[in-house]
Image: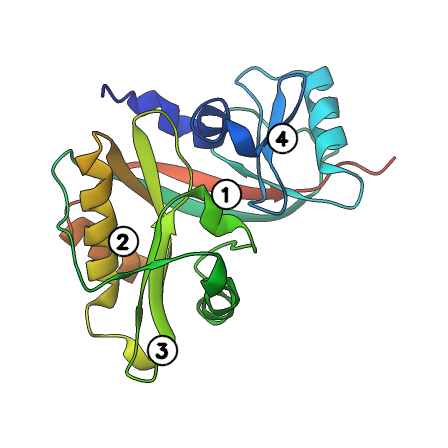
Amino acid sequence: MTTTTELLDNPVLAGLHGAHARFALSRGAAVRYDPRVAPFVALPAGAGPDDWANLAALIGPEGFGVIVGDENAIPADWPVSTRYEGVQLVGGATLGRLDPELLTLGADDVPEMLALTEVTKPGPFFPRTHELGHYVGLRDGAGELVAMAGERQHPAGWTEISAVCTAASQRGRGLASRLINHLAAEITARGERPYLHAVSENVGAIRLYEALGFELRRPIDFTVITPPAG
């Protein structure tokens, strides 16, 4: 499959018009994920006032959305709750290796997945986030979920590896590397390429991703927005 790197400049828009269309809610050119699945929203480049009005209607007066990238300047009357400065890293077409010891996680595991992401804070994870792709994990000797990662945004030819998290008691054992390598191998086996996001200040995670073969593509922001009042 041919991969177009430019799709990663606005990966939410690309994914919701493609592989993740079943999760899309749209109004005009504005699009967002079902809020039970993920908080991400998007507009095409060059969006005008009508497009932002449509996005406000999609989000609702009490809601919020997360924009990935900087395709459009956010209007001055839109409150910005938080802006996370991040980086985007891409992997090659032969990255990773399968790990037969990893467990597939599904609906029955959601309470434990939510509990693990709550304490490790890898990014937004909702009760239906696991439906976005394949999630894998590891359990300790007592059967407790101690590490996990999975697939999130899905522009054509690309799959984002996300929700990489390890319980504090299990860190330093290379579990994150195993999870990422396994997912990367699955992604490349189906002819796609993996990519990742990290907060710029998370130097340790970025170093790990680079050691696994990912390369920095560009800085990219995650901006939490709410519609203007009234």
Mark 2 or mark 1, which is nearer the start of the sequence? 2
Quadrant housing residue 10:
top left
Instruction: For the residues labelled 1 and 3, say whether their Cβ atoms are less than 8 Å apart.
Output: no
Of the pair 95 and 66, the residue shown nearer to us: 95
Quadrant housing residue 18:
top left
Q: Nearer the viewer, mark 3 or mark 4?
A: 3
Mark 1 or mark 4, which is nearer the start of the sequence? 4
Query: Can you name the residue that lies furthest to the right here?
Result: 230
Residue 175 at least partly seen: yes
**Mark 1–mark 3 distance (CA, rounded to whole Å):** 25 Å
Relative to 55, is 189 on the left or the right? Answer: left
- Residue tagged 3: 168
Number of numbered discs = 4
- Residue tagged 2: 206
Instruction: For the residues labelled 1 and 2, say whether their Cβ atoms are less than 8 Å apart.
Output: no
User: Which residue is rendered at x = 42% and y = 28% of the image?
Assistant: 19
**Mark 2–mark 4 distance (CA, rounded to whole Å):** 28 Å
Mark number, residue 71 = none
- Residue tagged 4: 74
Q: Amino acid at mark 3?
A: Ala
In the displayed structure, 114 sits above or below 59; it is below
Of the pair 167 and 49, the residue shown nearer to us: 167
Secondary structure of the residue carrying tag 3 is helix
Q: Nearer the viewer, mark 2 or mark 4?
A: 2
Mark 3 or mark 1, which is nearer the start of the sequence? 3
Count residues near mark 1 (Cα–Cα under 10 Å), then give few for <14, some for 14-19, many for 20+: some
